[in-house]
Amino acid sequence: MKIAILSGDGIGPEVVDEAVGCLRALDRRFELALEFEEGLAGGCAIDACGTALPEDTLRLARAADAALLGAVGGPKWDDPRASVRPEQALLGLRKELGLFANLRPVRTVDSLIDASTLKPEVVRGVDVLVIRELTGGIYFGQPSERRNGPQGREAVDTLVYTEGEVRRVVEVAFDLARQRRRKVTSVDKANVLSSSRLWREVAHEVAAQNPDVEYEDLLVDAMAMHLIRRPREFDVVVTENMFGDILTDEAAMLPGSMGLLPSASLGTRETCGREGTGLRYGLYEPIHGSAPDLAGKALANPVAAILSAAMMLRFTFGRADAASALEAAVEATLAAGARTADLAGPGEKRLSTMEMGAAIRARLG
Ligand code: IPM
Ligand code: MN
């Protein structure tokens, strides 16, 4: 099993190191036969090669069974007029590898219930899986450009979805809901957008074929409210690319820190252009960014990256045993009071990134 390691920028390398450390420990215990190979992506690739997603990196990611990514971006590459930007690495990998289903599980941890800005009785027991469509919508629609119009500068972005793009991601939502609490909430803006009306129509067709799973639609503005008002009532939430981007940052505040949330971006071997086993290819990454203000200070929380590695074990490698062991180690470490700076209350001891990684590894046996 080969894993492409794309650490990226900012705190990316720091948190990925800890996740790789955990994978190596599990490799010994569960005989996973993991191999790691590093590649450049994001700002560091721009510095080294002039492009955010070098051909070599794309080749490496394609040849591997899965990729683990840290984060990309930073002030050094932030010029909004630059034609080469770190984010192109992420968008390019998603599109080129056909990673259309982005799974973002949001679970509150009992021992961290006070880390949330929301009331404990609202967030205790939250367990939501947001599935964000990742290769369509306004992120990729054409035209997307700035131009000179009759009234001066203007710019356009295009929100387009085909029925096939909607169907395959909504089907993933139903498949996963069946392994959970059997409820799907589809989020759109069907009162305004044509693309959302198509989304809703197709979602209803898929729902009709899956009568054993409860289904509801919500408009995205209402969802933004319900997500913090009654988050426990959601099981699987499926939505288009940009709504999913926005709602998952909001959802991250339920557990209390962006440093806790992992993600998996999945495609089939088919969409990745590979023959095969039917296994899902995946790019795994924390949902947080490169946090340039924390970089190099060992302050970052590696839990999101470590839980992303657990998702890799579960989804790409089919090793629920190793994944569960890692998730249990994280939970036990947090329950024992280990806190990085983002989680520590006043006067609480703050662990460095490496200390948190070591504390989790110590529980892996
Ligand atoms: C995310 C990020 C990316 C996105 C950015 C960095 C392009 O915010 O993965 O959520 O918008 O998809
Ligand atoms: Mn985002």
Image (tube, rainbow, N blue to C red):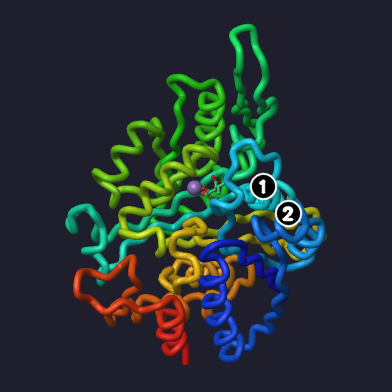
As drawn, is 237 to the left or to the right of 46? left
Residue 186, disc: none
Residue 150: percent from left, percent from top:
64, 7
Q: Which residue is mark 1?
A: 88
Name which of mark 2 and mark 1 comes first in the sequence: 2
Residue 249: percent from left, percent from top:
41, 48
**Residue at position x 45%, y 85% from top?**
358
Q: Which residue is mark 2?
A: 53
Residue 241: percent from left, percent from top:
54, 40
Classify 318 as above or below 162: below
As drawn, is 131 to the left or to the right of 316? left
Give the secondary structure at mark 2: loop
Residue 269: percent from left, percent from top:
74, 57
**Residue at position x 65%, y 11% from top?**
149
Give the secondary structure at mark 1: helix
| Within-10-Å neighbours for mark 2: few <14, some 14–19, many 20+ | many
Classify 129 as above or below 64: above
The residue most toward the top is: 150
Q: Is mark 1 within 8 Å of ligand 1?
A: no
As drawn, is 234 to the left or to the right of 9? left
Classify 102 as above or below 179: above
| Within-10-Å neighbours for mark 1: few <14, some 14–19, many 20+ | some
Hey, what amino acid is under mark 2?
Leu
Instruction: Give the Cα separation between the discs numbered 2 and 1.
Output: 7 Å
Callout 2–callout 1 Cβ contact below 8 Å: yes
**Residue at position x 39%, y 37% from top?**
216
Hey, what amino acid is under mark 1?
Gln
Q: Quadrant of residue 49?
A: bottom right
